[in-house]
Image: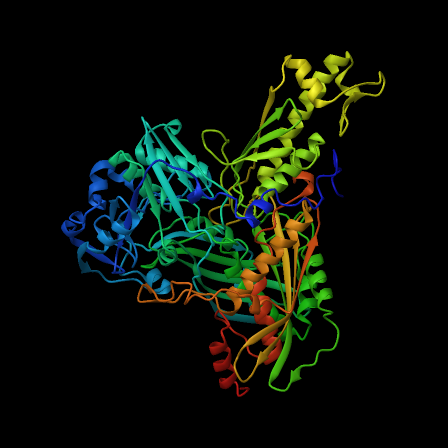
Amino acid sequence: MTPPLAGNGAVGARWPRVDGEAKVRGRLMYAADLPVPACLDVAVHRSTRPHARLVSIDVSRARAVEGVVAVVTGQDLLAEFGERLHTGPAFSDQPPLAVGKVRYVGEPVVAVLAQDRRTARHAAAAVSVEYEDLVPVHDVDEAVRGGAYVHDELRPSSVFGDLRHLSGRRDTNVNYEFVLRKGDADEAAAGATNVHGEFWCPPTHHVPIELPYTAAWPEGDRLTVLTATQTPSYVRQALADLLDVPLNRVRVRTAPLGGGFGAKMYDRLEPLAAVLAWTQRRAVRVTVTREEAFVLTTRHGVAVTASMSADEDGNVTAGTADVRYDTGAYADIGPRIAAKSGMVATGPYRMDHAWIRSRCVYTNKPSAGPYRGFGVPQVTWAHESLVDELAREHGEDPAAFRRRNLLREGDEAVVGTPMHSADFVTCLDEVTNALDWDAPLVRADGHLLRGRGVAVGVKAVLTPTISNAVLQLNQDGSASLMISTIDMGQGSDTIMAQIAAEVLCLDAGRVRVVGADTDVTPYDTITAGSRSTYHTGNAVRKVAESMRDRLVELAAERFGVPATDVKLTQDGLSCASTQQSASIPELVEGHFGARGTTLTSEANFSTEWIPYDKATGRSPRVTEHWFAGAAAAQLTVDTRTGRIHVEHLAVAGDVGRAINPTLVEQQLTGAAIMGLGQALFDHLVIDEGRVRNGSLLDYQLPALADVPDRLTPIVVESPHRTGPFGAKGVGETTLIPLAPAISNAVRDATGIRFHRLPLTPERVFTALGEAGRA
């Protein structure tokens, strides 16, 4: 049942984006556009080796360049900061400049500070480094076997509560292993219909339009940082630990982001900018080129060995998955990704038996981190390919087979947590209906083969996390909302304003969201994982309800009636029994006796979990809520070229309650197009540790010509009992099943099952030739 609305219908309305006009007219200020003190520009000399000891570093020619102010090495910083120099959300393994050895091609080795960017880059190129090569680890399975190790010792970080169980280890490249056991998967497979496969998702890059940027400057005994980040609260904690100062001596400011998708989380440029500004006592600015951004962070490449089994009635009985996440040279948040994704590696299906092992593995490649979907699209690629094959083995339509086996309300997922508000069946039905799934299909059209495919996705929201909100209601009836969620294009500033306005019966434009600034806005764990609408949205609803209650109390005092007799509406506060009323401006001015005054309230929303059992991986409450989504595609495959053309793509996401349907549809559409690119051509080519296509000339992204002839976003609403007005997040939902939906359609058209992404024309044409269909 949809939770009742409280106020003026702001929730559910298609309010325009609060920053839409400023974006269109080029007036929106991003971090690099904002004024800063006169800065030294920083350029970085980067490693040319994937794995090597630093024998010597010659910076004499760099220092001699006119305009250079300082040249700094990792050893210089180690002498100043000691082991605090190493930061990271899971393991303290990453220094801002390499110390002792390098672990990937492109790792920062020397920083040059100069009066301008051109001089800094010229001097950085003049640095000479002598290396002693070490055995590199390029392959994730080679890394698991050991022999050569990327790190000598693993030292856990202590920032996040859900990662405090990580332990220090030596002589291994596996920094984390999650294991889930339910029943006996091997026994269940005996005598059943079984399918299995080896799957590979390559590393990809986020490619946000706005490049990473950080400026930092000391102010007395404090450090101020202006940065393009999704995690200002985390960055403040990391920098305070690094500088060994109290939190109130670090201020982190940010601005709306020009895209993020996970690329601007955790430790990126901020530690380097902070230590340079702190030690040089000067304002510094770190910018990166597009080519440098490609080695700053990536999405995990993932290898999956998996199987699924079904009984003679076509009921899924068991699933297994051995998942290896290639996290590159530094762990970043890889351990959490391995755990959160591992728990859904057998998909949203009822089964009594499951075995999953999910590992996060170091290699000598650029560090991988969070990316839209948090590792789940990679495992979905495997389980949705297998369930498709299982349906075909059973002789049943793939959509009908899924529909019978999908988890329903109250069913227990293999991880042990019940399902609530995760309407997989409706998502599946909506996308197949949109494609007229059961209608006859013209299978061949000359050299074109036609097929349809469908896939379903499941993901757990990050739990536990913390969100806070502060609300100032101004005497004139406008409000300032202080939160640390970052609007990076998803429209969070708009929907947070809608939630507050709904409770306080305010019109559009009356609630302004204040940009994240740790001196002003309260703590928020992260802006990621589709969590903000639920977590921060709940904090916003609570803070607005607190303010509403205070207004009611003030009105009751003014009217001389019980608070239960007072009601807040769009017309103000009124008491029906006495016919008294007052507008918000009248009430607040009457309370304080002055104009321009403010009422302030604050609220917190924290989620709880029951940590999974370390032996079985199961928990009765491992997540606050689930995401459900589905995608269906109709496409053609050109047997002369291997090119795939998508005629119709339908995507559906269960969002609980659409706070703003327009923004939800845009999120569904954006995720679908990003997923289409990952299915068809988007991937990083890393050869012997070196990124070979790290530029926008060589790295292919979806262009207008790649968009399907028809794209249908579908909003499914299955209200969550604890969501703000029933809402959940949406940002990742339709990216998750996209690649397998495309691949399943290719399988339907050609009879060929692909196990490696992307489905480039070269890969498809080669497979068609091998199958005798080219």
- In the drawing, does residue 470 fall left or right of residue 41? right
Residue 716 appears left or right of 38: right
Identify which residue, 570 or 353, lies in the foreground.
Answer: 570
Who's the residue at 25% across and 47% down the image?
111
Horizontal side of residue 609 vs 439, given as left or right: left
Q: How many labels sit on residues?
A: 0
Which x, y percent locates residue 169?
31, 48
**Percent x, y for residue 346?**
56, 60
The answer to whether residue 640 is above or below residue 532 is below
Residue at (51% x, 58% y) in the render: 355
Q: Quadrant of residue 193?
A: bottom right
The residue shown at (23%, 48%) is 99
Above-or-below relation of 566 to 357: above
Residue 193 can be seen, yes or no: no
Does any portion of residue 596 appear in the rendered image? Answer: yes
Seen from the viewer's position, the closer of residues 702 and 347 is 702
Q: Depth check: 678 or 320 in front?
A: 678
Q: Quadrant of the N terminus?
A: top right
Quarter of the image where one finds residue 435: bottom right
| Residue 369 percent location from the top left of the image | 42, 52
How has the structure been colored for display?
Answer: rainbow
Counting from the top left corner in percent of width and height, residue 413 is at 61, 52
